[in-house]
Image (cartoon, rainbow, N blue to C red):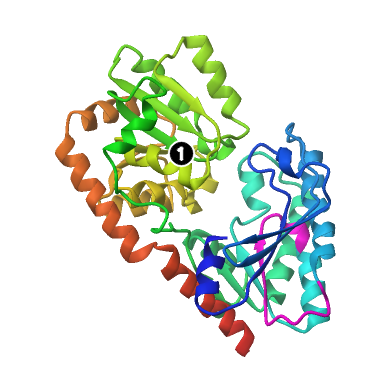
Amino acid sequence: MGFAKYLVRAGHEVQIVAGLPNHPVSAVYPAYRGKLLVRENFLGISVMRTYIYANPQKRLHHRLLNFFSFGFSCLSAINLKEKFDALLLSIPPIFSIPSAFLIARLKEIPLVLDVRDFWPRAATSLGELKDNFTTRLLEGLMKKCYLRADQIAVVTQGILDALIEAGIPPEKIHLVTNGVDNEIYHPDAKESGREVYRALGCEDKFIVLYAGVVGIIHGSWVIGETARLLKDQHEIAFVVIGDGVKKAELEAMKLEYGLANLYLLGNMQPSDLLPYLQGADLGLSTLQNAYFCESTIPVKIFSYMACGLPVVFAGRGEGRQIVQDNGAGICLEAEDPQALAATVLDLKNDPEQRHSMGKRGMQTVSKRFSRQALAESLESVIQVAIQK
């Protein structure tokens, strides 16, 4: 949606087809329940939301039904008589690929794949799927899809390298990373941002903020364990904003250890999240110690940096490299609560270092990771597909 806004400003007409909102809790939001097709307009962008099966239990068959349901329902939102110049498909989920190829063939337009995870390898790496004949068959089918796509955009260098290793021609693969919308996230009103913490009773404390999905990949148990190690440091508060399959784990840790210093809030719209970012002292990003994380760039680090927050990155991979290379924060090994606790204490007592890290982070996102600049890169990829 963020890219679409800037594509419209550049003079393009954009139509989006998406499932009914259900992420990350895997339950269709109340305003959309019982509906099969919802038409919306967002900043001049036509959005068609189609039926999707969602179940918060998130077992394998539930996830597969979720993927398959949108793969079929998305067809109901496409008007085959309407003229389009190109089709951009964001994956995963991968089961919408056949529908995308069908639409592109019928309308005689190029198909650009926007690859967000190297699936199913990502799922097997995290233990969500077993490495067996079925997953290897899926890998083979995905390779054929990559070969048939007109152009491919990827969000990390790791995915780009994996596609080349799989035999996909490098000339049709383009790196277009995640980024941040500087019009939404900015450091203004940092002092008044403390007001939102007043309702939590921690406006005078040192705020360590985690804002994003609390999922399997994020190793977020480390936040709860670090809060336990620092529970006697009454001037420090850990605030987690977001939902996901591992949120219940943090809730259980808070109850079991009596963590009065751990505050758990739900998902927020960007406008509501902004003051929490502006009023925090540190932005925290954690990842599981898994091979898959090597090619992961958590989007939350860009929001932190745009708001002038120094980043504490506990994990490995490309996200760590961005923080480290640009001096935007401190990088630690994954799943090490003792090291995280020590770092929080060190940075709490060093406001000058926090300020310089935050300043470098703002400069970095402005130069390299603004959503507007990245939208221009994506526009170029689409134009290449159209011209060829």
Q: Is residue 24 left or right of residue 49?
A: left
**Image location of residue 84, percent across then percent down:** 71, 80
Q: Is residue 205 above or below residue 146?
A: above
Is 313 in front, or is 303? 303
Residue 367 is left or right of residue 54, and the answer is left
- Position of the N terminus by quadrant: bottom right
Query: Residue furthest toward the left?
Result: 352
**Residue annotated with mark 1:** 211
Q: Residue at x 46, y 10 (%)?
A: 258
- For residue 98, above or below residue 86: above
Q: Nearest the camera: 10 or 370?
A: 10
**Residue stretch in magenta:** 79-96
Q: Nearer the viewer, residue 121 or 21?
A: 21
Residue 200: horizontal and vertical position, in percent? 41, 22
Q: Quadrant of the C terminus?
A: bottom right
Residue that appears at 53% across and 73% down: 7
Picture coordinates of residue 211 (x, y %)? 46, 38
